[in-house]
Amino acid sequence: MAKVEGKSTHAVLTVTEVPVDFTAELSEIHTEEHKLALFCCEVNKDDVTIEWQKDGEPLTPSNKHVIQSEGRRHSLAIKDVDQSDVAEYSVVVGDKKSLAKLHLDEAPLEFTIPLTDQTCKEGETVTFKCEVSESNLPATWLKNGQAVTLSDLVIASVEGRTHILTIKNAPLDANAEYTIRIKDKESTAKLNVQEVTADFTMKLEDTTVPAHESVTFACEVSKDDAPVEWLLNKNKIEPSEKYEIYKDGRKHSLTVHDLLPEDSGEYVARVGNNDTSASLTISDIPLEILKPLVETEVLVDEPVSLTCTVNKPNVKATWYKDNVEIGPSENVVISVDGATHTLSIKK
């Protein structure tokens, strides 16, 4: 009311409360698994009561959902987002509501631990290992750009986020650039296989063998497909009917047939710069009569031949008659044909 010189006037003032409303509404969120999602809004009045909802159901503060208010600003933080958090979120204040969706996007794959270059010796086991940001994904391994052929000696495995390529008994031709491809990502590293000089794991042994028999020298080397050279008294031996050279993986052998005195000596097997040697001694065969003389009856003045065979060729023989040595004459012929000895009496 107001008075002026005895006059007055009055009026009624009515104050109407401004309705609460949003000055900044929620926005849709795109995030990746295990990250934090933060919804924010702002209203036009301080200290108002709000409610957060997920798919229409009220949310309460927890380790998973952190609700905060600061003046007119309000927020909902969702920790360690996973697929179960994908929903429509809303915030309600008075009779007003703001809504927004949470979307879970696939995170780009990353190599958290890439492949590294490896070095090993020939015949050893070597392993390539890497780690990616997702678990149990299929992978392709490449060798110099070509798909790796897996086998008992080349093994690919996955342990969660870790991918492993194991090469056992690594050969020289495993020297290469290796690549692992997962989705659209790759990691590459080199393998250097160092050659190992072949050596003998089983050496030759000295031996003594009777003449005209066969002997086999055997040895074993430390590498498959390592060439072995054979020598006799420093002269290279070539395969022939006399010399049989055999190889089976790491095992090597030399067989010498029909041994003669000149076959005795030092036999050497050589691989690279390494040698093994053995001496061969030819022993004399004890003389034996294989086919003895046979008693024979003939008429007077008829020719007759007496024959025997021994186990050694060209052996000197002496013939006797009633313990008296006899030799060749006009009527007596003595001959030798290899191991067969003959006495012929003309009459």
Image: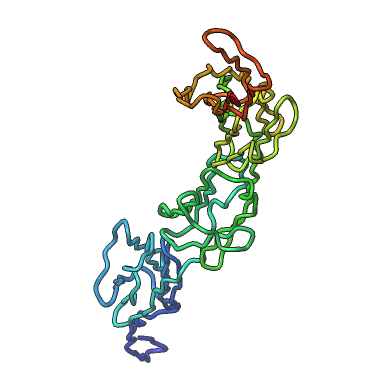
Q: Residue furthest left?
A: 57
What residue appears at the point 40 percent right and 79 percent down from the top-left corner? 22
Q: Is residue 310 left or right of residue 177?
A: left
Taking 239 as reference, is 165 above or below it? Answer: below
> Residue 326: x percent and y percent?
61, 13
> Residue 285: x percent and y percent?
55, 19
Taking 344 as reference, is 104 above or below it? Answer: below
> Residue 60: x percent and y percent?
26, 64
Q: Is residue 270 left or right of residue 94?
A: right
What residue appears at the point 28 percent right and 76 percent down from the top-left corner? 55
Q: Residue furthest front?
A: 300
Residue 128 appears in the picture as rendered? yes
Taking 61 as reference, is 250 above or below it? Answer: above
Taking 203 as reference, is 20 above or below it? Answer: below
Q: Quadrant of the N terminus?
A: bottom left
Q: Quadrant of the C terminus?
A: top right
